[in-house]
Image: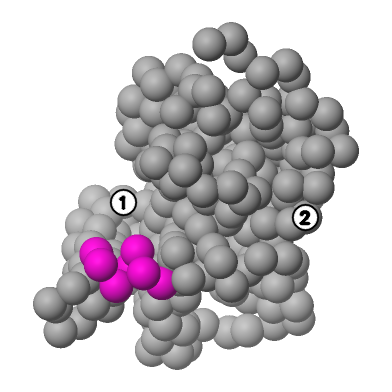
């Protein structure tokens, strides 16, 4: 059986628009997926939140002592960094698996392909909403001052959401076509934990060190754009520009590639 020809931009955009409109469909898929994952447990998805609390506490204590940091400011820094990083990498991995994981549904049920990307995005975002309670608690307990920079938080959330969906639109089909890419993504995500300013403070490094360690890391820009306002600070110009450029490029690549291979995806799964 030969492959279908390349799809058109209009068909790809129409699929994405239809998928966004059918939020009840991918919302239901997400809800059933979460329920099945935590069936017969008392805390359900709150177990991951509890694990997050334990991990953040241990990470803050360990690196706070090793790096001689002020625990009062270091704990909120690590908590926000780890939770937001987990959300972002969860969407990357969820986007990578979106097509392959739903192969049977794609080949048997007609409907917009973007539904499966949106379902993976929603699943990780729901878990982030649970973990966000930890962020609020940490900000209150450690009396973090909130300034006018807080107005940027909705914009930062929107940027992360848009990038999370866009990644799934181009990475999901790539993994469906070349399955080895999924393993590569998993390996890269693990390494990115150390190259993203989660438990180390970027301002403690020289400009050259920051550029070498995190300058090439797109997650570092998104994290800084999200974390700085929550800590009562304005994000740096580099973080703002990096987030804007990343979002534009990611959306363009996502829409273009998804549209191009839209009609071929069913052949690859």
Residue 32 in the magenta stretch? The answer is yes
Relative to 11, residue 61 above or below: below
Residue occupying image coordinates x 62% and y 24%: 264
Span colored in magenta: 31-37
Residue occupying image coordinates x 63% and y 84%: 146
Label 2: few (<14), some or many (≥20) within 10 Å?
few
* Total numbered labels placed on residues in the image: 2
Residue 141 falls in image quadrant:
bottom left
Residue occupying image coordinates x 42% and y 51%: 90
Relative to 123, residue 240 above or below: above
* Between 62 and 122, the one nearer to me in the picture: 122
Q: Name the element at disc 1.
A: loop
Q: Earlier in the sequence, mark 1 or mark 2?
A: 2
Residue matched to label 2: 17
Label 1: few (<14), some or many (≥20) within 10 Å?
few
Q: Are marks 1 and 2 in contact (CB under 8 Å)?
A: no
Q: Position of residue 192 (x, y in %)?
A: 42, 36
Relative to 54, residue 264 above or below: above
Residue 41 falls in image quadrant:
bottom left
Residue occupying image coordinates x 48% and y 71%: 28
Q: Position of residue 3 (x, y in %)?
A: 61, 14
By what rule are the colours in the image chosen? one colour
Q: Position of residue 108 (x, y in %)?
A: 47, 43
Residue matched to label 1: 67
Instruction: Determine the residue located farthest toward the right in the rendered image.
Output: 10
Instruction: State the predominant SS element of the stretch in magenta.
Output: helix
Residue 155 in the magenta stretch? The answer is no
């Amino acid at each position: 059986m030969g492959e279908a020809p390349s799809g058109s931009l209009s068909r790809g955009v129409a699929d994405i628009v239809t998928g966004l409109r059918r939020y009840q469909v991918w919302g239901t898929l997400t809800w059933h997926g979460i329920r099945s994952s935590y069936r017969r447990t008392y805390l359900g998805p709150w177990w991951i939140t509890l694990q997050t609390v334990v991990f953040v506490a241990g990470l803050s204590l360990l690196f706070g002592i090793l790096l001689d940091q002020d625990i009062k400011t270091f704990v909120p820094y690590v908590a926000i960094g780890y939770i937001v990083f987990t959300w972002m990498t969860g969407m990357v991995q969820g986007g990578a698996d979106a097509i392959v994981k739903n192969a049977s549904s794609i080949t048997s049920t007609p409907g917009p392909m973007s539904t499966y990307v949106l379902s993976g995005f929603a699943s990780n975002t729901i878990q982030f909403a649970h973990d966000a309670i930890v962020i609020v608690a940490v900000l209150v307990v450690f009396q973090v001052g909130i300034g006018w920079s807080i107005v940027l938080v909705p914009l930062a959330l929107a940027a992360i959401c848009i990038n999370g969906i866009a990644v799934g639109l181009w990475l999901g089909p790539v993994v469906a076509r070349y399955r080895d890419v999924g393993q590569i993504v998993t390996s890269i995500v693990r390494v990115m934990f150390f190259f993203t300013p989660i438990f180390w403070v970027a301002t403690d490094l020289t400009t050259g060190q920051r550029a070498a360690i995190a300058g090439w890391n797109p997650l570092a820009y998104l994290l800084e754009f999200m974390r700085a306002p929550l800590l009562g600070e304005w994000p740096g110009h580099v973080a703002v520009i990096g987030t804007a450029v990343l979002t534009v490029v990611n959306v363009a690549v996502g829409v273009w590639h998804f549209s191009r291979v839209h009609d071929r995806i069913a052949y690859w799964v």
